Structures are given as C-alpha cells and as structure tokens.
Image (spheres, rainbow, N blue to C red):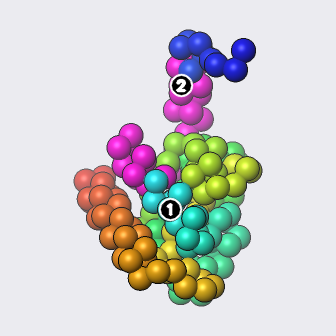
Amino acid sequence: MGSDSEAEKSQKKEKKVIALAPIAKPLAGKKLCKRTLKLVRKAAEHKCLKRGVKEVVKSIRRGNKGLCVIAGNISPIDVITHVPILCEEAEIPYVYVPSKEDLASAGVTKRPTCCVLVLTKPTKGEIAQEEQEKLKSEHNQVAADISELTSSLF
C-alpha cells in the first residue's frame, strides 16, 4: 500500500527529467546533487539558509555571500529566471537540482521550494566554531565542484 512498484518509481524519475526547464544549466549530476542537498540540510539545521525567491533575492541584494541552489522543475519558469543573473552579478556560485520537492525536503520545509541560498554563517545568533568550520569546508568543496561544472559547460 505505502510502497511504490519499480515501474512507478521509474515513471516518477522520468517525470522529473521531462519537467526540467530548458534554462536549468549547470544541472548537478547525481553525485553533486546528493552532496548539495546534504549541504542544504546541514545549513537548515544550523539556520544558515534562506528559502524562496523573495528571501534569496533580498539576501543577495543585501550583499550576503553563499551558494544558490535552484530547482530545475519550476513552472512557470519566469518565477526564477532573474535569480541566476543576480548570482552572476554578485559572484555567487549557483547550481540547478532536478526537483523542487527534494530541495524542500533537504531544506526542512513541507512546501516545494524554488531556490535556497546556503550562507556560511547564520544571520541571527552564533553556532559553534567547529560546526561553522565544517559547514564552510563543505560549502567550499561543493562550490569548487560547481565552478568546475560551470567551466566545462561554457
């Protein structure tokens, strides 16, 4: 009852690929996507995450630095077309992940999320120095992988 058959699971994965927006480049591969979503989850636990287009845009305009993760299956696509441009102007690395549902679950929200901005330090309060160093090192590693992916694309 609760479990899907293999055919239904493969159909769901195919739907994700079909629903991808044509502007979803650079799209994270399977391994990079997993690491990026793991980073998003850690950032959410430490309250170093901005969720949604409005919050992300406001944060970028205020000069916050981080890593922008955008969902590739947003409809209508016009909702997020300006976010990559803002990221490029602010020199913030960004990457697309295939599913807004996966991004929301990694960001610890119930509603599907268009984009998130992973910050290296929390906007309010403090976290332990050791935890902040861990988060920053993971952030830098994912950012390096994204820049490598982007350079191979363009």
Q: Residue at x 52, y 32 (%)?
A: 17
x%, y% of residue 132?
A: 43, 77
Upstream in sequence: badge 1 or badge 2: 2
x%, y% of residue 29?
A: 37, 43
Q: Residue at x 57, y 52 (%)?
A: 106
Helix, strand or loop at mark 2:
helix
Where does the magenta region start and end?
10-37
Tell me if I can see residue 125 in this picture.
yes
- Whether residues under marks 1 and 2 lie with C-beta atoms below 8 angstroms apart, the answer is no
> According to the image, label 2 marks what residue?
14
Helix, strand or loop at mark 1:
helix
> According to the image, label 1 marks what residue?
42
Q: Is residue 5 left or right of residue 94?
A: right
**Could you classify mark 1 by the number of other residues whose Cα lies within 10 Å: few (under 14), some (14-19), or many (20 or more)?**
many
In the foreground, 131 or 139: 131
Name above or below for residue 85 compared with residue 79: below
x%, y% of residue 150?
A: 32, 58
**Could you classify mark 2 by the number of other residues whose Cα lies within 10 Å: few (under 14), some (14-19), or many (20 or more)?**
few
Quadrant housing residue 117:
bottom right
Amino acid type, label 2:
Glu
Image quadrant where one finds the C terminus:
bottom left
Amino acid type, label 1:
Lys
x%, y% of residue 16?
A: 56, 33
Q: Residue at x 46, y 54 (%)?
A: 38
Tell me if I can see residue 78 in this picture.
no
Quadrant housing residue 55:
bottom right
